[in-house]
Amino acid sequence: MKLILSGLAGLMLTTASHAGGIDRSSLPLSVLFADGQTVHLGFSSVTPSVSGSYVSPLTFFGPSTGNMAEAYTTMNFALKTDLSDKLSVALMLNQPYGADANYTGGAYTGLEAHWTSSEIAAILKYDVSDQMSVYGGLRNVTSKAEIFIPAVLLGGSTYQAVADSNSQVGYLIGAAYEKPEIALRASLTYQSEIVHDFATSELFTPPGGGGESLAAAALPGGINTTTNITLPQSLTLDVQSGIAANTLLFGSVRWSEWSKWHVDPAVYHGATGDEVTGFDNDVITYQLGVGRKINDKLSVFARLGYEKATGGEASRLSPTDGMTSIGLGGSWTEGNIKITGGLEYVMLGDAVDGSGTQFKGNTAMGVGVSVDLTF
């Protein structure tokens, strides 16, 4: 079977489905297994719809939160080249984590938080034999964040924090087994945790003080602290195999240790005795799909995704719990250029926050496209 199908499992866009929408984009590791020199460019756009219904007495300010999740885009890039018959190297860029919460309706109006990140990775792959390979390298993740909490949630005071951009290094290691004649490839990839130590400016404004918004670039009078936030380690098993003529089955299982992700600035914790947000449980994401080669140029595919709901109290900044997704797409090859596109619809799991606000029936829609050039 010609391996026109083999890149399909690597395309499908990441939507607002993983760990409350914070885990957004993975490194394009499938480039490591491409023949020859390869340039990869990927783009995705996600439009979530996440709203909740207040319970008394919060209904005094209005019945609904409105859509609190803003649309976002991600991009990734990879350049892979062969150094010898057995050794290759790849440089990869992506935007792995993010958050864009902004409440515009009812009691939570003004609650707003943003997290942005970028990642650069350099990875070496060594072919131990015709079927076995190992790979590994370093990852540098740069992130920054800001949050504003309105007075109604803090007994009349407002709170604002800005975390300066911070870069930290982690690593990635993996191994793969391939049997090209049946398009079989199984790979296991581990990514280490990364701990940011953000220089943070925190500011409480007392009742009647007015407060600022996230439009402010700095916090005059803010207290300077350090906030440690752990980006989770993960382990991913990716498998694909031909199951019939021109038909490929692919899937993955990914464990991420999101239970270690907590946002707990010192001044906020001292004043409230609580953290700003965090997750209580790890996340396991399952994906299963099938691809079909129509002809030498066109392939199509479909994919299902699933994350189990874990229950418990949801954070107002990521008020969903689990997900089910379906994705459809296709790939067109013309000479040494392959263009792949897909759509993914995500049904986000219901959740209830600490005030009893119920977030139900929420969804996200994503669209993605990638271009691969081999030479």
Image (spheres, rainbow, N blue to C red):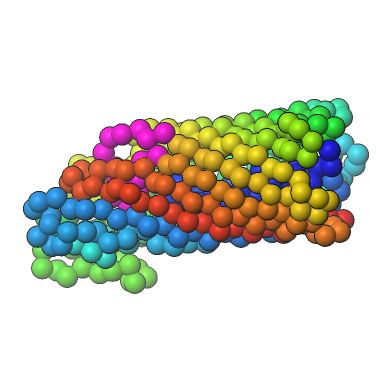
Instruction: Pinpoint residue 308: horizontal percent, then vertical percent.
Output: 41, 33
Q: Magenta stretch?
A: 308-322
241 or 277: nearer the viewer: 241
Q: Tell me if residue 316 is in the magenta stretch.
A: yes
Along the horizontal axis of the image, is 181 left or right of 318? Answer: right
Residue at 12% from the left image edge and 55% from the top image edge: 58
Q: Is residue 196 visible?
A: no
Rendered residue at 76%/33% (across/down): 244
Which image quarter: residue 200? bottom left
Residue 52 vs residue 119: left or right? left
Is residue 277 shown above or below 104? above
Residue 263 location (% of width, % of height): 35, 45
Q: Nearer the viewer, residue 221 or 253?
A: 253
Q: Nearer the viewer, residue 334 or 11?
A: 334
- Quadrant where the C terminus sits is bottom right
Is residue 180 within the magenta segment? no
